[in-house]
Every structure is written in structure tokens, then in C-alpha cells.
Image (spheres, grey):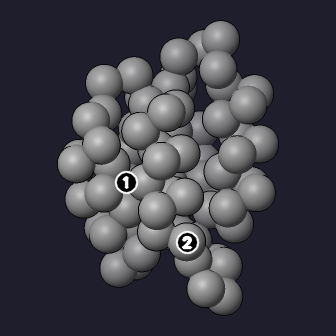
Amino acid sequence: MKINLLTCDAQRPDRRAIAKCIAELSSNVSDSLANELTDILLEGDAVDIEVSDKNSGSALRALRKLSIDYEIIE
């Protein structure tokens, strides 16, 4: 499943937690790429990630917990 991460609405976003979440949920994202994607997201640009279908429920829950707005693409 593809997810488009739109924005992070947290008052004080936790960069480390967001990067860790992206690295754990994404199919093929390294830690350094997750850090770059987190920076892009927090600057206000959308980020696409691929999540395996078996992790989709927990992935969406984790994103909501971090105050990340998303849309499901596929």
C-alpha cells in the first residue's frame, strides 16, 4: 500500500520518532533516507512511502499518534 504523508500538525514534532516510524513502516527505506524524508515532511512537502499490507493498520495508527496527516494512494 502506498501512503502519501502530507503534513505534521504536532506543536513540537519529534524528528527522531518520525524518522524511526518511517524507517520501521516503509518497505525499503534506510535510516538515513528516513531522516531525509522526515526533514522534507517537516518543511511542508508531501512524502510518499510504501507500506506492506500486513503492517497497514499499525502504520496508520502510528502516523496518527505522531500527528501526521496522510492519504492512502493505493
Asked if one can make out residue 4 in the rendered structure from this viewpoint, the answer is no
Tag 1 near tag 2, CB within 8 Å: no
Residue in the image at 22% along x and 48% along y: 32
Q: Which residue is mark 2?
A: 14
* Residue 23 disc label: none
Where residue 60 sits in the image (x, y, percent)?
70, 40
Tag 2: residue type?
A: Asp
Q: Answer above or below: position of 9 versus 7.
A: below
Residue in the image at 46% along x and 62% along y: 16
Q: Which residue is mark 1?
A: 47
- Upstream in the sequence, badge 1 or badge 2? 2
Where residue 44 sits in the image (x, y, percent)?
40, 77
Where residue 58 sits in the image (x, y, percent)?
73, 31
Residue in the image at 76% along x and 57% along y: 65
Q: CA distance from mark 1 to mark 2?
A: 17 Å
Where residue 13 sits in the image (x, y, percent)?
57, 77
Tag 1: residue type?
A: Val
Which of the pair 33/60 is nearer the observer? Answer: 33
Q: Is residue 8 left or right of residue 10?
A: left
Of badges 1 and 2, nearer the viewer stands 2
Q: Answer above or below: position of 6 versus 61.
A: below
Q: How many marks?
A: 2
Within 10 angstroms of label 2, few (less than 14), some, or many (20 or more) residues?
few
Within 10 angstroms of label 1, few (less than 14), some, or many (20 or more) residues?
some
Which of the pair 50/24 is nearer the observer? Answer: 24
Secondary structure, mark 2, is: loop
Which of the pair 60/36 is nearer the observer? Answer: 36
Identity of the residue furthest to the bottom in this view = 11
